[in-house]
Every structure is written in C-alpha cells, then in structure tokens.
Image (tube, helix red, strand yellow):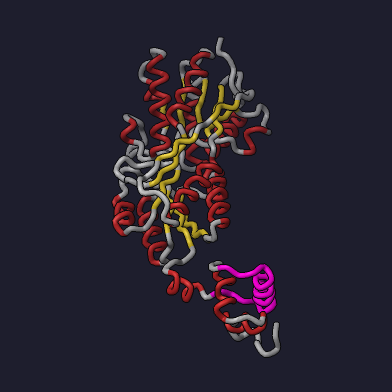
Amino acid sequence: MDKSLPRSTSVTVADVARRAGVSKATAARVLGGYGTVSDRVREAVTAAADYLDYRPNELARSMTTGRSGAIGVVVGDIENPFFSLAMRGITDVARRAGFTVILINSGEDVLIEKAAIRTLLARRVDGLIVSPAKETDVGHLHEVVRSGLPLALLDRGSDTLDVDTVIADDRHAAENITRRLIALGHRRIAYLTACDTPDHRFRTTKDIATGSVRRRIEGYLEACREAGLTAMGDWVKVGAATPEKTRRIVTEMLQSSRWPTAIIASDSTIALEVFKVHAQLGFNIPDDVSLVSFHDADWTSVTTPPVTVVRQPVYDLGATAAQMLVERLNGEGQVARKVVLKTEIVERASTREVL
C-alpha cells in the first residue's frame, strides 16, 4: 500500500490513475470495463488498482451507468441439489457477463418469495431469475414485468406471464419412466412429491401449484391411463417436504397390506429418504420395491444398488435462464422465449421386472 494512502482512506479512481501514470478518464475506462485502451495501459491500471487495494464504489457506478451490476435470483430450496447445481449454471454465466448474483431462498413459501422480490427490487438489481413457489400466485411477478425489469423463469413456467422461461420436458420424462415400470409388470406405482394440499391428499393435478411437479404427475397419470390402470391418483403421495414427513409417508406405504411395487421420487432429496426407510424396514431394492428418482444426484450412482434416475439438464437450466436474462439486459430480442430442455433416463440397478 502506498504510504501516502493509509488503509483507512478510501482509494479513488484518481489515486489509481496517479499511480499508473494515466489520466483519470483512462483509469475509469479500464476499471469500468468500457471504452478502448492499449494492453500496456490496461496492465498498468490493473496493477495499480491491485497494489492500492482499489474497490469500486458500487453506488457511484450505479448512479453513473443506471445499473447495479447485480442479478437477483429466488429459488425454492437451496439445500436441494437441483437448485444448487442450477445456481452454479446461473453464476457461471452471470460472472462471465460481468454480473454478480444475489440469491434468496424462498423455502417454497410464496409469502417469503414476495418479500424476497421486494428486497431485490429495493437493492435495484438489473434483472430477476425466479423459480415460482406457486404458479397460481404470481401477481407480484406481474408487477415486476409492468415495472420493465427483465425477468426469467427457471424450471417453472406460467401461462399468465409472457417472459423468458426455461423448463425441462418433465411431462414427457414422467410418461417415459412410468411406461418403463409398467412394461416391467408394475401396477402399484407410487409417485411421491414434496408438494402438498390443505388436507395432505391428492385429488387433481390442479392442486399442485409447482408446475414442474404438476407436469410430471400429469405424465405419470397419462401413462397409467394408457395402460388401463385405474384410480392411480390414490398412489400420488403429497407432503414429503421434510425428511421426517417423507419417512412417515414411506413407512405407512410399506407397512400397508398393499405396498407399492415401485416408487417414483420427485427429487433426489426424497429418494434418499425412501432409500433409507427401505433399509430400516428390511425391504430390499429392487427385489421388494423398485425405485426411480428425478435428478441424477451424486449419491444415486454409488449406493447399493445404484438408483435409476431421470437425468435433468440442471446446470443448463440455470445457465440458459441466466443467458436469456443477460441477452435481455443487453437489449437483444423482443419476443418472450420458452426453452424446453430434454431429459434422459439413466438405467441402473434399482428397478426390476415383477413376475
């Protein structure tokens, strides 16, 4: 640190310019990432900034450029490996484009989501990426659109929001994996989700506020209908929102007189608890019950047996949402885009034919 600039003093662009031997305007171009300078000048300014421990004044830069340089992201459950990997895709793209990311976890609670949006708007973020907790309650997101702030939806779309959206082909994936289980002879196939209803019972897909899960259940039910299976709605189990609740639901199913011969877990967090309960109750996978999980979490490939999964393009979901938002911030495109990414089934050893 320059002795003439004690650490308690805020280092300015002028200080950096003086040490680098360039004009203040030139130093500002290098530090702000705009305009054209020679490589020699850029290196000199960068070296001076590093030496002086220069930190940009974000408020001043925001007032000058009209931008905060930040993107706000609201997701449902950051402890879920799905959202963790999606966030990696978002942050990688955002960083390359020069944006920082402010993340808020909604806990799949729409009231918390609304408060999060208000907080991010107060922070004057340049754009938002949101995975809506309830696709039937998006009035706050309509307000964002009306304000002119760019918005992209991640993993969960909305029929009422005309904004950039990226989702996976969830319905098609659920149809495919259900058909495979049916082809193996399974008829008692349970679908287990964290989504819940007021009385904790599934009656219709309209009860499911999370679009990605609703599409999966629709695909599951369609494949069952095609096979002539009836009353399969009874096998849709809701409310597996915590490990404790998941264990209770799975235990009740396995201890009933007609336990399922196959379980489809709506995410890998649920699947892990399903796997644990089977071991605790002395059930064998796949001899007693076949297991399939959405999301190819790391643990699913190293268990005994390894778990068959629907591999979702999770990183790409996040990266695509961020890329669409960055393009929107750069003034590219006028019409809202909807991108549907393909999934794939990874066959492992947790399913078997029912004789």
Q: Is residue 332 above or below residue 62?
A: above
In the rendered structure, the answer to whether residue 135 lies left or right of residue 355 reads: left
In the rendered structure, the answer to whether residue 224 lies left or right of residue 161 reads: right
Nearest to the observer: residue 124 or residue 354: 124
Image-quadrant location for residue 115: bottom left
The verdict on residue 355 being magenta is no
* Residue numbers of the magenta segment: 36-56
Q: x, y percentage for residue 212?
A: 42, 37
Residue depicted at x 57% and y 56%: 96
Residue extending farthest to the bottom is 4
Q: x, y percentage for residue 299?
A: 64, 37
- Where does the N terminus fall, quadrant-wise? bottom right
- Residue 258 shows up from this direction: no
Name the magenta segment's main secondary structure: helix
- Residue 7 shows up from this direction: yes
- Where does the C terminus fall, quadrant-wise? top right
Residue depicted at x 57% and y 68%: 36
